[in-house]
Image (cartoon, rainbow, N blue to C red):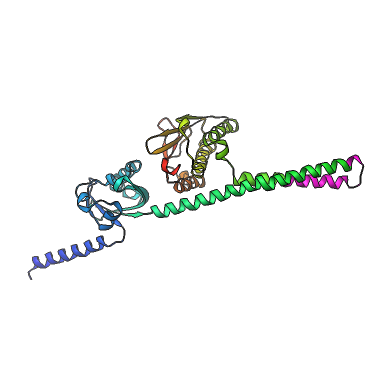
Amino acid sequence: MDPIEQAEKIIDDTYVRYKTIFENTGTATILIEEDMTISMVNSELARISGIKKEQIQGKMKFPELIAGPDRAKVIANHKLRRETPGLAPRNYPCRVVVENEEVKECILTVALIQGTRQSVASITDISKQKHLEREIARIAEEERQQMGQILHDDLGSHLAGVEAMSSLLAGRLEKQGHKEAELAGEIRELVNQAIRKTRNLIQGLVPVNLADTGFMNAVLRYAREVKKAFNLDCRVTGRTEDIRFSNTVALTHVYYIIREAVNNAAKHGDAGDVEIRFEQDESDMVIDIRDNGKGMAGKADTKGIGLVIMQHRADLIGARLEIIDNPSGGTIVRCRIGKKYLL
């Protein structure tokens, strides 16, 4: 075998070896060109997307596989990976569009192929895991609210009755000048302390009862509280009259995302103006919390515990959370959630 044939055989063997590895990685894998054309996919990608290989390879751009709200992020990271590789995230969540316009929640892992301008990306479907997490969170939230309701209706009412009887007894003994009147008064005070502790416990278990007060009423009430507490203008705008969803567990998480974002703006962003804006399109509800403070997008403090909790809440309800620089100064915290999670 002459040197040229030998070299060709080595190349062919290497190609077969790497194609076999590519095809059998166990995760959906794609090869992306610099112009974002998908040049190769494996069978797992075709399986989870429901799109045939021949419909993808050389015919689709990578962003076409990504759900609309996440496309800008994927495009920006693709560009950043070639300009400043160290700043581009290797792993991040994104939603992938599959057949029948269904969306799957996935983890995207992307890296440049050394010595080329091509990327290799693997897509791990975590939809079932996220669904399970949301179900666990829903059940836990419902049980917590049920426990709070039981404490309110049962123990709270029982203690109120005991307090009324102890007050009556203490009053009678005091009128009679009975030597145990003071002890009866102490018992009454202990019962009152138990009532206050029970109320605090209920408040911790069910801090906002959206079923009774309504989601928008709770948000509007909180905006008024913020105005008084921080002496800033906090207003609720947008299509607030359309917020009529029945999933109080999901709405509770949205409510606390709003609270945390407003608190960050007031306490840490030095904001004097906060707008809580609601918008809706055909499939999503979008909440923007806009402030005119010192800004936080892209800074280290975006990893603070408050924002970590906000992100966790968003993950539990299938929402997407973004921290954006406000063009007019300050920060925009954007929460986008599919309406199907709120029904």
Q: Main secondary structure of the magenta part?
A: helix
The quarter of the rendered structure image containing the C terminus is top left
Residue 322 visible in image: no
In depth, the one of 279 and 159 nearer the eye is 159
The quarter of the rendered structure image containing the N terminus is bottom left
Residue 158 visible in image: yes
Residue segment shown in magenta: 174-194
The residue drawn where x is 44% and y is 48% is 315
Q: Residue furthest left?
A: 2
Identify the image quadrant of residue 280: top left
In depth, the one of 204 and 162 nearer the eye is 162
Q: Residue furthest bottom?
A: 1
On the image, the x and y values in percent for residue 12 come to: 15, 64
Residue 30 inside the magenta-drawn segment: no
Identify the image quadrant of residue 314: top left
Q: Classify residue 299 as left or right of residue 145.
A: left
On the image, the x and y values in percent for residue 302 come to: 46, 44
The residue drawn where x is 31% and y is 49% is 85
On the image, the x and y values in percent for residue 61 come to: 24, 45
Q: Check the image and report above or below for 204 versus 274.
A: below
In depth, the one of 190 and 209 nearer the eye is 209
Residue 182 inside the magenta-drawn segment: yes
On the image, the x and y values in percent for residue 126 come to: 38, 54
Q: Check the image and report above or below for 263 versus 78.
A: above
